[in-house]
Amino acid sequence: MLEEYEKEWVRPIRSHVAKYEFCRGFIEKVTLSERAFVGFAAELARLVPIRELHIRPGWPRLSALLDVLLLWPRLPRLSKLALASLNLGDAGAQRLADCSALQTCTRSICVATASAMRVRWRFRDPST
């Protein structure tokens, strides 16, 4: 069935995402740039049941990324959030650590900042 309908199911998000992966018949893993996420977040939440979100850096850097991400309606449903190459800084890492919507992120949150250990500890990342 996936072979038959994949192009149709992916059409609404294809121009915004760099990579996607189906799981149990749904698009559950998505990789996109921070610019694409900020511009497409609301529609993305409406269109696909994302469980793993990978956001890559873009140019120019967007200060609005964390504002949009922390209010994103699908955030509480994520099992993995990867922001490792975004260099969010200590303040950004602290905002992630304080975000109650991420309490259900069961697998991991990947960040790369001086405060990454604080974020990983807060969410009990098994890779540490």
Image (cartoon, rainbow, N blue to C red):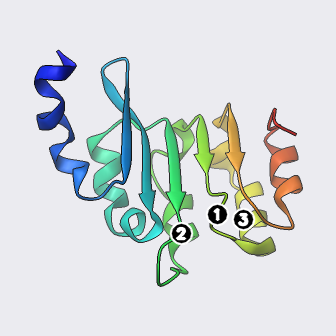
**Residue at the spot of label 1:** 85
Quarter in which the C terminus is drawn: top right
* Residue at (53% x, 69% y) in the render: 57
Disc 1 residue type (three-letter): Ser
Residue 5 at x, y = what percent?
13, 26
Kind of residue at badge 3: Arg
What residue is pinned by disc 3? Answer: 95
> Could you tell me the amino acid type at mark 2?
Pro
CA neighbours of label 1 inside 10 A, class few (<14), some (14 to 19), many (20+): some
Q: Residue at x 50, y 46 (%)?
A: 53
Please indicate, yes or no, whether residue 98 appears anywhere in the rendered image.
no
Residue 104 position, x and y percent, is 65, 35
Q: Earlier in the sequence, mark 2 or mark 1?
A: 2
Mark 3 element type: helix
Q: Could you tell me if the residues under marks 2 and 1 are in contact, i.e. CB atoms within 8 Å?
A: yes
Assign a secondary structure to mark 2: loop
Q: Residue at x 52, y 81 (%)?
A: 61
Tell me, yes or no, whether the two marked residues, 3 and 2, touch with CB atoms within 8 Å: no
Foreground pick, 91 / 53: 53
Mark 3 or mark 2: name the one nearer the start of the chain: 2
Check disc 3: other Cα within 10 Å, few if <14, some if 14-19, many if 20+. Answer: some
Q: Is residue 62 left or right of residue 15?
A: right
